[in-house]
Amino acid sequence: MAWLRPRLLPLLRPSSEAVAVPRRPFSSAKDGDGADGDEGDGLGKIVASPSTTTNELQWPLLKRKSESRTEVKENALKAMANTVISPPSESSDDTEKPTLIIHGLSPYLYRSDFHRLGTGGWLQFTRSIHPLRDPSTLELDPLGRYFIGFTTEAAASSYRDNLDRLYRLARTRMLSPTGLWQKKAPADIAASTNPDQVDSLTILPASQPLHMTQNFVKRRKAWFESLGRIITAFGYPYPSDDRPFIILLRVYPPNLETATLERLIQDDCNVRKCSWRISKPFFLDKNFGSEFDAQDPLHTSVSPKRAEPLESQRRRFVFVCDNDNEAHRFRRHWNQRTLFTENNAKKERHVFHATVIHW
């Protein structure tokens, strides 16, 4: 029992003479491998500064972070704000891009009607705004479908959400009998939308349902290919970013020949003493663009088994113009115009309808 005496000796001493033995911290990674005679405790290497607490001395690996969570979030937001967001480069026209399709709109809308609905910096991501047209007749879609192309899917979703929010506010204002529509509007859209922005919704009335879909659609539509064939016939390159302006002229009844139309335009130039800076008329045949029509899943052409009635038939001609002002000047001069021609000693009355196609 002699070997127990050295170990029991400190316990038998009085409390005043007891020697405090330092404990090894649990967080120490060394266990008996201390250097320079430290016996593995690692306490000899820790120098306590005035600002060091007792917990940091006993647990050196559990020090407080120098930055708080609020500072970390603020630094991350500053880094995102300093990053310049630029739209991706335009790729080939055959690639599919995110597109928002709005149904049931008026055929007499302009691009400004859609641009004023955009949110802040997302307008730079708007790629194109076009109504759907028939590739054979170049007439507008009777269902009123408009295609709004974007460079990113996030821009399309942002535009769709903002349009839906404005429509819900406009509908709440319309259904309010007392005029206190702002208090009855849902809280999630009333707080984040300026009431004055409701007046910017001009593409459709609040009484009409809003139907829109988001999909990936190719940029080149079937009626784009039809217009490309027309401008190629006049010597313009296609595809090209510098596209000429297209004028669609419809004549009723459909018995006016191309040579007669050229003579009428020349007579008008002699009366005005100024020639029109447009191309010669390009006659649109019934089967024009039929091969593109068959490839397009969203075509609007009439089935061959369903013939058009005589009253709805039109003879259509296309003109190409380099100047936007000249194209609109020709449209204003020839739209809803009535002229008479002589055919076999009979006078025939012809009504003209003109429109400018933006593509």
Image (tube, rainbow, N blue to C red):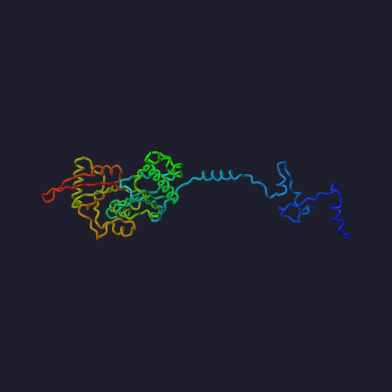
Name the residue nearer the viewer: 137 or 65: 65
Q: Position of residue 146 (x, y in %)?
A: 35, 50
Q: Is residue 333 above or below residue 41?
A: above
Q: Position of residue 172 (x, y in %)?
A: 39, 43
Q: Is residue 254 above or below residue 331?
A: below
Q: Position of residue 271 (x, y in %)?
A: 19, 40
Q: Position of residue 110 (x, y in %)?
A: 33, 45
User: So how many labels did they put on this image?
Assistant: 0
Q: Quadrant of the N terminus?
A: bottom right
Please indicate whether residue 48 sits to the left or right of residue 207 in the image: right
Return the residue found at the far left.
345
Return the residue found at the far front.
178
Name the residue nearer the viewer: 121 or 174: 174
Please indicate whether residue 329 sits to the left or right of residue 71 in the image: left
Q: Is residue 195 above or below residue 222?
A: above
Return the residue found at the far right.
2
Please indicate whether residue 355 sits to the left or right of residue 342 in the image: right
Name the residue nearer the viewer: 189 or 295: 189
